[in-house]
Image (cartoon, helix red, strand yellow):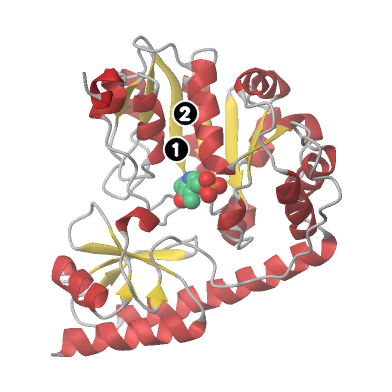
Amino acid sequence: MSIENLARKTVRELTPYMSARRLGGSGDIWLNANESPYVNEYSVNCDRLNRYSTCQPEELINAYSAYAGVDSKYVLTSRGADEGIELLVRAFCEPNQDSILYCPPTYGMYAISAQTFDVATKTVPLTADWQLDLDTIQANLDSVKLVFVCSPNNPTGNLLKRSDIEALLDMTANKAIVVVDEAYIDFCMEESVVELLSRYPNLAILRTLSKAFALAGLRCGFTLANPQIIELLLKVIAPYPVPVPVTDIAVQALSEAGLARTKFQVLDLNANRAYLQAGLSMLPGVTVFDGYGNYLLVQFPDGEKLFSTLWDNGIILRRSPIENCIRISVGNRDECEKTLAFIRQQLEQ
Ligand SMILES: *Cc1c(COP(=O)(O)O)cnc(C)c1O
């Protein structure tokens, strides 16, 4: 018997998430993973490394709750927002019985986390203007325990209408949890639905330090939700989910100085996004969709060909499932200028 055959059937049949890292590539300009171009300095204290970490370090929880404007009982920290997705699936979905629902085109990890735990996935595509199709969602809520929505949505970049999210929360009351993925909300903080937490016990919000805080390698994320949800997630989380150095660094990132730095970097990246958007919009046959995160979805006359040419020339972007569309992360000004210049030159040939 081969080792392969020892594995669960689900795992044998699983296609893992093709992260930007796994896709490889070689180049000078990496605008494929919505990472921040900023490299910030931190100090790490090794004094406590002989001891296990606490499950939910108080100073980290308090720092994020102050940043998010919610009580600390509403905050859970985990290894990235990705672990938050997985904890929600494990806490709320009975394998081979319950389902999750999500609205493509969107982030790929909702489906993969569900599949890994033998939880079925239902999809209700976004409308033509990339908003929620509430009627179709309502008609498909049977057996659904979690509805994942993403705002700003990855990869389309648009925000979901707040009134639609409220309608979704009303529609699913006592039936399902609505998970609003706010991985990119720090780029447009006033658009957060965090204030809905006090009105909706079935709301969970995902946050991360990976994007605006320039800490993708740290693996630190948060779930914001009513204490009843948080308590359930704490039942299924690993005993030591947050390494001691992660807490040290995250607390520095969330200090007054750290927050001021992030705010400055967000302003700078939003300006670079505007530069990229303006420059690309002027090119013939190119459509740039309004984006609110640190990336833009852009439609080209022949997206596939352009993507490959860029790839071959060391400019690594991300393919999207939408026809002829490429997702471009907002880098520093130099990266944006070089990418724009290269694309302009290609399209003018
Ligand atoms: C990047 C991203 C995440 C994952 O964030 P991590 O905290 O790095 O796990 C979650 N959701 C969306 C939409 C993302 O783009």
Residue name at image x 77 percent, y 44 percent: 69
Q: Is residue 152 visible?
A: no
Label 1 Cα neighbours within 10 Å, binned few <14 / some 14-19 / many ≥20: many
- Say how many tags the image has: 2
Q: Nearer the viewer, residue 92 or 95?
A: 95
Residue 89 position (above or below residue 325): above
If you read the primary sequence from the N terminus, does the residue marked by circle 1 or circle 2 appear first?
1
In this rendering, the answer to whether 36 lies above or below 233 is below
Give the residue drawn at x 41%, y 78%. 276
Circle on res. 15: none
Q: Quadrant of residue 99?
A: top left
Mark 1 and mark 2 residues within 8 Å of each other at the beta carbon: yes
> Label 1: which residue?
149
Is residue 42 or residue 269 the one in the foreground?
42
Q: Position of residue 188 (x, y in %)?
A: 58, 59
Q: Which residue is mark 2?
A: 168
- How far apart marks 1 and 2 lie (CA) works out to 10 Å
Quadrant where the N terminus is found in the figure: top left
Q: Residue at x 38, y 64 (%)?
A: 32
